[in-house]
Image: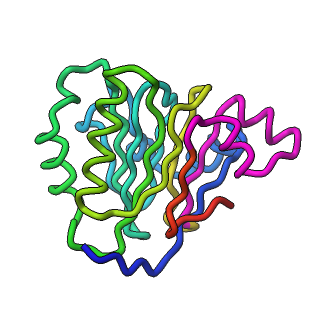
Amino acid sequence: MQNNITFTSGIRAIPCKQFSTEFSRISSKNSVDYPWTLAESVKSNSAYTRGVADCTVCGITDGKDVLLMHVCPTMKTNHNVSGLRQFIARNIDLKNENLQGILIGSKQNKLSQNIYNMFLDFLNNFHIPFSELKIANDKVNVGYMSSTDEWLVSSLKMDKLLNKGENSKDIFTNTFEKVTISTVDEIV
């Protein structure tokens, strides 16, 4: 797949209260909730999830719609690589040259890394550019708003850093062990 991305997604750290306000405006059916399997994934113009710790969140967007997946590593059924690939292929046009993604979460243990790496391999195999915010030191909330083409990320630790006047780049660096921003994304 050749990527001719015609839009740039922003990635922004916001306070938890603002996260709640922003996503209370959209339907609760756009929330990816427990038990965090592929079955709870959401495809919509905007979607969100909360409490990402050892789970992995993968979002894939074309700038109009997003497929948001929040996958828990403790559930055996979530470790099916073939099932993951088929699920994404059924929900995303993999020939769309405008696809881009984001990976957020995981912890430094075998089960968690297995889920993260399944998504990582998928994105790399289909040449979908993506950003990474890997291994947070706090539970995070993640959402995508198509109206602004932004990934919004919040946590209690981020709230403290925002209150100190830190910018999103420094906040992500202080919250995640690995921060890699795709050339088609920007921290705002």
- 93 horizontally vs 22: left or right: left
Vertical relation: 86 (above or below) 49: below
In the image, residue 174 above or below residue 112: below
Where residue 80 appears, as percent x and y from the top left, is: 15, 33
Q: Which residues are magenta?
A: 149-178
Residue shown at 21% from the left, 72% from the top: 95
Quadrant (top left/top right/bottom left/bottom right) for the C terminus: bottom right
Q: What residue is drawn where x is 45% and y is 81%?
A: 6
Which color scheme did the rendering employ for the protein? rainbow
Magenta-colored stretch includes residue 165:
yes
What x and y, as percent, mark residue 106? 44, 30
x and y percentages locating residue 70 in the rendered image: 37, 37
Q: Is residue 150 left or right of residue 164?
A: left
Query: Could you say which quadrant of the image residue 116 lies in?
Result: top left
Whether 51 is among the magenta residues is no
Horizontally, is 62 left or right of 134 in the view? left
Q: Quadrant of residue 138?
A: top right
Q: What residue lies at 67% left-to-right and 48% top-to-bottom?
A: 13
Please state which of residues 176 and 65 is positioned toward the viewer in this rendering: 176
Residue 71 image point, x, y percent = 33, 33
Left-right relation of 82 to 169 = left
User: Residue 1 versus residue 14: which sits nearer the camera?
Assistant: 1
Total labels drawn: 0
Q: What residue appears at the point 24 percent right and 73 percent down from the top-left corner?
A: 1
